[in-house]
Amino acid sequence: MSIFFSFLILSILSYIFGSINSSILLSKFFKLPDPRGYGSRNPGATNILRSGSKIIAFITLMLDILKGFITTAVAIYWFEDIIYAQIIGCITVFGHIYPLFYKFKGGKGVATALGAVLGFNLFLGLICLITWLMTALLFRYSALSAIVTFTFLPLYTWFSFESWTITSIYLALTLVVIYKHKNNIKNLLNNEETKIGEKN
């Protein structure tokens, strides 16, 4: 099997895998409200937390991280070129944000993107996780934590690899994730953003 064909197949599978939304499925299974119908209406772990279901929110977070991690790790094992693995991880994030199964309306991709970075390079991923946690502890805004983390991701990537190609791919990922937070940015500027754990 040629590298191109393998990459094409894995890209399609990664997009489909990314399109599976754990917060929606877990909410249905445990008979919780649909996360698209309350709070920020974002089908993700932070919004599940607003419902008061901490355990389900944690499971959602772990599953979303695993989505990005697994596909990237498989791609690293499959291909010799780490660029392919990096792109596969980003495709999984794209599937989470624009899912095939939910009319292309999904989450904001933060946890899945962090998982993809962890699968690509454990050290780089841990730096991003630490950045997210420190920002969350200081300010208690999930959106702000994501924006800060992904703003620094291209810088972290450059200092880690000194590669324009690798850095450019994660710069593109950063732009997509921050774009998905455009409403949160407005709320933060207007002091209307809900803090982690608060109901709105």
Image (cartoon, helix red, strand yellow):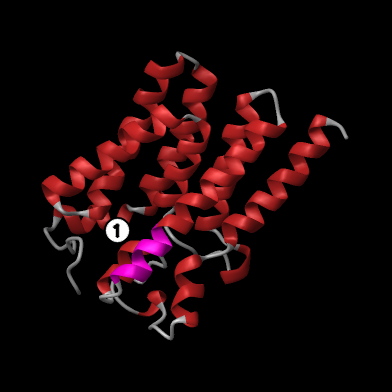
71 left or right, relative to 56: right
**Image location of residue 106, percent across then percent down:** 49, 63
Indicate whether 6 appears above or below 47: above
Instruction: Say whether residue 40 is visible.
Output: no
Indicate whether 169 appears above or below 14: above
Q: Main secondary structure of the magenta part?
A: helix
95 left or right, relative to 195: right
Q: Which residues are magenta?
A: 54-61
Closest to the observer, 133 or 192: 133
- Say what amino acid the circle numbered 1 marks: Asn
Residue drawn at point x = 20 percent, y = 48 percent:
136
106 left or right, relative to 87: left
Q: Quadrant of residue 88?
A: top right
Residue drawn at point x = 60 percent, y = 36 percent:
87
Around disc 1, counting alpha carbons within 10 Å, would you say few (fewer than 14), some (14 to 19), or many (20 or more)? some
**Image location of residue 186, percent across then percent down:** 22, 55
Instruction: Say whether residue 151 is visible.
Output: yes
| 90 falls in the magenta region | no
Indicate whether 88 appears above or below 124: below
| 55 falls in the magenta region | yes
Residue drawn at point x = 24 percent, y = 44 percent:
133
Kindly give the residue lying farthest to the front in the view shown.
Answer: 55
Closest to the observer, 31 or 46: 31
Quadrant position of the C terminus in the picture: bottom left
Quadrant position of the N terminus in the picture: top right
Residue drawn at point x = 52 percent, y = 32 percent:
120
**Image location of residue 171, percent across then percent down:** 44, 32
